């Protein structure tokens, strides 16, 4: 599996975009903020059709919840946003 950010897609263009970089930056900022709040260095965003529909930070230790990983928290938030939108 190639995880190189400069991978070339089928059209010959570089994979990824400035929007993707913005989403990644948002996840990193969530992680940095979580560390400042004595949490783990993990943040996540869920994006659908170019729109952030959920964000999350690792809450395992602070919430005493072994399932409260950043990506799970982001998915939960995305699910809540989708259920309230429709």
Image (cartoon, grey):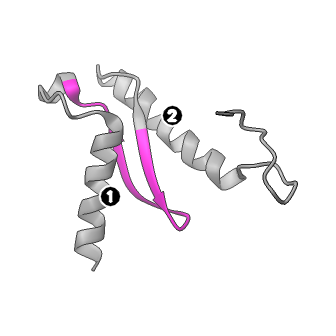
The picture places residue 54, in percent across and down from the top left corner, at: 36, 54
Which residue is pictured at 28% across the width and 54% down the height? Answer: 77
Residue at the image point whose x is 63% and y is 50% from the top = 20
Asked if the magenta segment contains residue 42, the reply would be no
**Residue annotated with mark 2:** 28
Depth check: give the residue in front, 83 or 27.
83
What is the x, y in percent for residue 17? 71, 52
Q: Is residue 27 left or right of residue 36?
A: right
Tell me which corner region of the image, top left, top right, bottom left or bottom right, holds residue 78: bottom left
Residue sitting nearer the eye, 22 or 60: 60
Residue 38, placed above or below residue 2: above
Q: Position of residue 70 (x, y in %)?
A: 33, 36
| Quadrant of the snapshot with the C terminus | bottom left
Residue 19, compared with residue 8, is above or below; it is below
Q: Secondary structure at mark 2?
A: helix
Please state which of the two labelled residues, at mark 2 or mark 1, is closer to the viewer: 1
Stretch of the chain drawn in magenta: 44-60
Residue highlighted by disc 1: 78
Residue at left offset 19%, top offset 22%: 61
Q: CA distance from mark 2 to mark 1?
A: 18 Å
Residue found at the far front of this picture: 1
Label located before the other in sequence (2 or 1): 2
Write the residue at 72% across / 33% down: 4
Badge 1 crowding class, 10 Å Cα cut-off, few under 14, some 14 to 19, many 20 or more, is many
Farthest residue, direction right:
12
Determine the main secondary structure of the stretch shown in magenta: strand
């Amino acid at each position: 599996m190639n995880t190189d950010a400069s991978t070339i897609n089928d059209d010959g263009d570089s994979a990824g975009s400035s929007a993707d970089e913005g989403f990644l930056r948002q996840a990193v900022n969530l992680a940095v903020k979580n560390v400042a709040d004595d949490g783990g260095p993990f943040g996540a965003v869920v994006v659908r059709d170019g729109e952030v529909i959920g964000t999350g930070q690792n809450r395992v230790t602070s919430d005493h919840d072994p399932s409260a990983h950043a990506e799970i928290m982001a998915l939960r938030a995305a699910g809540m946003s989708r259920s309230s939108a429709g």
